[in-house]
Image: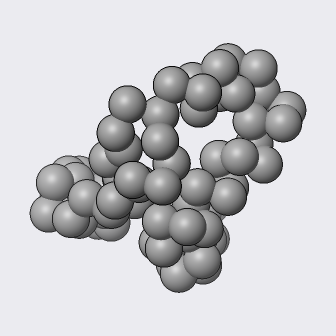
Amino acid sequence: MKENNANARTGHDSYFRSVFKAPERAAELLRLAARHNESLAEFLKTVDLSTLTEISESFSDTESFGYADLAFTVKI
């Protein structure tokens, strides 16, 4: 069962990464999610999403999980 979950996560991770790696798409995802999450909407009012920049995968702990997270920086 764990192996199936790992394979599903890897497939999902690959798809998510290919779609949202571009900062413009990640920003749009955040805007859409903020429509349903008041805390996120308030947070997004404090940042400039036009400055969203991807952080290198080398900053993620790939040894523990075998894959890197998508991470971004943004100016306040």
Q: Quadrant of residue 33?
A: top right
Seen in the picture, residue 60 relative to 19 is either above or below; the reply is above
The picture places residue 26, in percent across and down from the top left corner, at 56, 60
Residue at the image position 59 percent from the left and 32 percent from the top = 44
Seen in the picture, residue 76 relative to 72 is either above or below; the reply is above
The picture places residue 71, in percent across and down from the top left corner, at 36, 53
Instruction: Assign the C terminus to one quadrant of the image.
Output: top left
Residue at the image position 60 percent from the left and 68 percent from the top = 25
Residue at the image position 23 percent from the left and 65 percent from the top = 57
The picture places residue 9, in percent across and down from the top left corner, at 56, 65
Q: How many marks?
A: 0
Side of 11 relative to 68 (left or right): right
Side of 66 relative to 19 (left or right): left
Side of 59 relative to 47 (left or right): left
Seen in the picture, residue 17 relative to 43 is either above or below; the reply is below
**Viewer-nearest residue: 34 or 12:** 34
**Viewer-nearest residue: 30 or 69:** 30
Residue at the image position 74 percent from the left and 36 percent from the top = 34
Q: Quadrant of residue 52?
A: bottom left
